Amino acid sequence: MTHVMRKIALFILILLLSAACGRVPSVDWTEGPAEPDGRALHTLVLHDVPEGSRVWFQELFDSKTSVEGPTMNHYQGTSWYIDIPESGTVTLKYYGRPLLRRSWAPEAFVLQQQGSADTPMEVRYHFLEHPQVEKDEGCFAGNYELQPADIIPQVKQVKYLDSTVETFPETSPKTETPPIVHPTGWYRIKIGEDGVPKVESDDEDGAFYAQVTLEKLPQPLQPMTIEDWPDYAYRGFMLDVVRDFRTVDEVLEIIDLMASWKLNTLHFHIADDESWCLEIKDFPELTEFGARHALPDWNLQETCALKPSANGKIGNTSFYTAREYQRILRHAWDRRIRVIPEFDTPGHSRASIKAMQAYERRTGDSGFRLQDPADTSRYWSAQDFTDNVLSVYLPSVYKFYGAVFDEVIRLHKEAGVPLPAIHIGGDEVPDGAWSGRDRHEMKEIFINGMLDLAEAHGIRLAGWEDIAKELEPETQERLKNSLYFINVWNTEGIEGFPVVLSPAAYTYLDLAYSDSPNEIGLHWAGYVDECKTFALNPNDYKGDIIGVQAQLWSSQLRSFDDATYQMLPKILGVAERGWNGGYLETFETAFNRFYSIIIAWEMPEWERKGYVYKKR
């Protein structure tokens, strides 16, 4: 029996003995009703907790006012802890925000005692019964009479044997004057009365999309001619694996789903405050420390791992090795999907900062330091961190990211897969960062430092819209030369930059479907369902629109089932808008047709594969 196995066996024995004596620590959490002032009085009861212990838990929101019992202390991000003054049962009552969704309740309770292993605690929830609000689901009728070529995304032109033609407006390529120049991804399928398809295409993308279409058409194939192509060159999906990790096999399944809807870019969000999820060979601490989660020690120090993320998991190390990352790259490229990795900077950088502090402790090398020890800035980030901003004035910051860029370029090159860009984030740098220094000057230093790296490495950058704002004209022009795109998520458009539309109100799949307490997700930008994503109109936005993208942030996810539920079917609206920017019918008719296809062809396939999805 190994040392680890002995520890596990001992841990189980302790739990069993404790259970036999009736002293297993546990939790009851009771939801309080909303009061006129907008608060709710919640009750937390901790059973059989030892004196001098500490109870940790995760909760998304930080608005708490103690009324009874010991103090609830905020640590970083979603983490809270309670120091237990006496053994037995401890009751706390506190004012917090009303619980609009049950997934927002505190979770992942863990008992911490000095000299003992951290022990997960059972939690029992007592939720209020909220009245069900009847909603008008008329737009989800799904009673359109479908034709054989009705698939998602919908084809541009189809001519059946009876010569009926369906087409989308103002999207056909000019065919009157030879030579014909087809858009990238164009294809034509001719199916004769014998049911045998003949495919034409100008490139590998078009050939692949033709095959996807043939696999989706109902069997036996009906006589018809299809001509089809995408309206936008960039059709993306952003997957956040930082807050709730997705295994390699899960990522491959998501890539297969993307391919079935002709999406062509995986924006891979693999480094943020909560974790660093890619092996970088020169810096083992990035994953040994920055992808591992454990409770801080008794002195509130993270000495061997990062604090738990919102999902509360401890003791796990979740990252992709170089070989696993390359497996993902190849799987995607075989399906004509490009992968753009994102390392969020200069905010959202807590995992890399803490990991490189561990690297410096081990090696004594301060040459890759990411945060100035003399920095006395006081700030509070959007996700409740107070220590997640790079000291962008340190040359060591760019030395570190230069090494990261080197490794990412190497991995793509070895895999034989293109690297369209490296995404540097650039969003949500909290006010108060870089205390005593000019904020505008710090942004100029950061953008120019990253541009130096991009130019030296011969790569392009991408970022959230924030990186393109409030720059000096010279820096702005320089950025345009090295920029692949910016994700516009919060404004209507930014002139002069290539834009991937990513508006939160239409494309953030992590937002809840509705205000039902049983849904998961947030609603800071409203509610998002497949009707909302389908309603995205790229023509409403200014600027050089090169494509659209759906986003799945994972702070509210706890499993692959949660991920597929939030994706399916709402991601299909974004896929449709990326392939077809417009539609012929009224919105109601167009959506009814779209949703009818989902019911007829997509949902049965999800059922067959066992995916969890939103049912009406």
Image: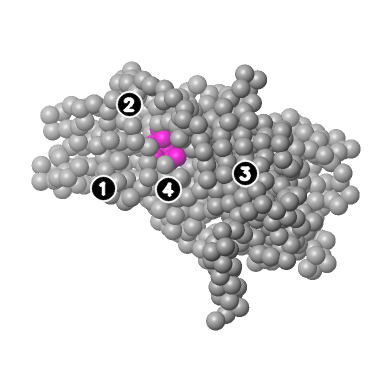
Question: In front: mark 3 or mark 1?
Answer: 3
Question: What residue lies at 38% left-to-right and 51% top-to-bottom?
Answer: 256
* Residue 313 image position (x, y, % from top left): 58, 55
Give the residue type at disc 1. Glu
Label located before the other in sequence (4 or 3) = 3
Label ID, residue 215: 1
Determine the secondary structure under disc 4.
helix
Give the residue type at disc 2. Phe
Determine the image quadrant of residue 484.
Answer: top right
Badge 4: how crowded within 10 Å, few (<14), some, or many (20+)?
some
Label ID, residue 561: 4
Please name the residue that numbered disc 3 is placed on: 45
Give the residue type at disc 3. Val
Badge 2: how crowded within 10 Å, few (<14), some, or many (20+)?
some
Question: In front: mark 2 or mark 1?
Answer: 2
Residue 412 at least partly seen: yes
* Residue 254 image position (x, y, % from top left): 42, 50
Marks 4 and 3 sit apart, C-alpha to C-alpha, by 30 Å
Q: Nearer the viewer, residue 496 or 362?
A: 362
Marks 1 and 4 sit apart, C-alpha to C-alpha, by 25 Å
Q: Which residues are magenta?
A: 566-573
Determine the image quadrant of residue 473.
Answer: top right
